[in-house]
Amino acid sequence: MKNNTGYISMKVWVRVIIMAVLLISMTSCSSKEESLKYYSIGLKAYSEKNLKIAIENFEKAIDQDKKNISARNMLGKSYYYSQRFEDSKKVFDDIVDDFPGNASAHVWSARILMYENPTPEKVKEAKEKLLYAIQLDDANPDAHYHLAKLYEYEGNVVNALLEYNSALKLGSQISRIHKDLATLYKKAGMEDRALEHMQALSSSDRIAASGETNNEEEVPKKKKKGLK
C-alpha cells in the first residue's frame, strides 16, 4: 500500500513539473510575441520620425524579451536621435557587454564619443572601438566611414582617404561618401579626383554639397556637434 501511495505521489509530482514547464514555455512564447508586436509598432513610429512613441514601444519590447537585440539596437538609435546621448551610449555599451562580437554596437558607441562633446580621451576611445569593429567585421561600411571622419579630424589625410574609399566600395550611403571624398581631395589639392567624386553625385546631391540645401544623410535628422 505504501509503495502504491509513493508511486501515486511521484506521478502527481511529474504532472506538476510537466505543467509548470508547459506554462513557462507558453509564457515565454507569449512574451516573445508581445515583444515583436511592440517592436513593429516602434519601427513604424521610428520611420515616421515619431521618436517618443518609438522609444516607448522599443522599451516595452525589451521589457517583454530582453534578448530582442533588434529592439535594443533601435532603442539606442532612437535615444541618439532624441539627443539622449548618455542613454543611447548605455544601451549600446550594454549590447557590447552581452554580445562582444556585435560590430554595429561598437560603431554606435564610437559615434557618440566622436560627435557629442568630444575630448581627446573620447576620440582615442572612439578610434579603438572603430578599429575593433573593423576587426570584427571588415565589411561594416559605417565603421570605415566614421574612422575616415576621425582620421580627417586628426589631419591624417592618407588614412582618411583609404577609409572613405573602403566605405565607398562597400556600397553604403554612397552619395555622402562621394561628397566627403570630393571635399577631402580638394583640400589635398587633388582637383581632378575631387571633380570625379562631384560628378558621381546626383544633381540634387551636388546642390546639397554646395550648401544650397540641407539634405541630411540619415532619418531621423539631427545635427552633429562634435567632429566636423
Image (cartoon, helix red, strand yellow):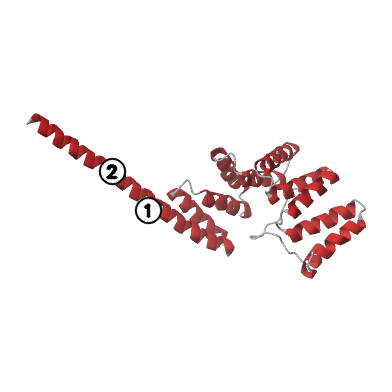
In the foreground, 9 or 104: 9
Q: Earlier in the sequence, mark 1 or mark 2?
A: 2
User: In the image, is residue 1 above or below residue 91?
Assistant: above
Would you call the spot at circle 2 few (<14 residues within 10 Å), some (14-19), or many (20 or more)? few
Position of residue 175 relative to residue 116, above or below, is below
Residue at image position (68%, 44%) is 110
Q: Residue at x 73, y 48 (%)?
A: 144
The numbered dot on residue 20 is 2
Q: Is residue 212 visible?
A: no
Label 1 sits on residue: 30
Residue 209 relative to residue 43: left or right:
right
Of 10 and 66, nearer the camera is 10
Q: Position of residue 212 (x, y in %)?
A: 80, 67
Instruction: Give the answer, above or below, for where 219 lies relative to 151.
Output: below
Q: Position of residue 72 (x, y in %)?
A: 53, 49
Residue 122: % across, % down: 71, 39
For the N terminus, the image quarter is top left
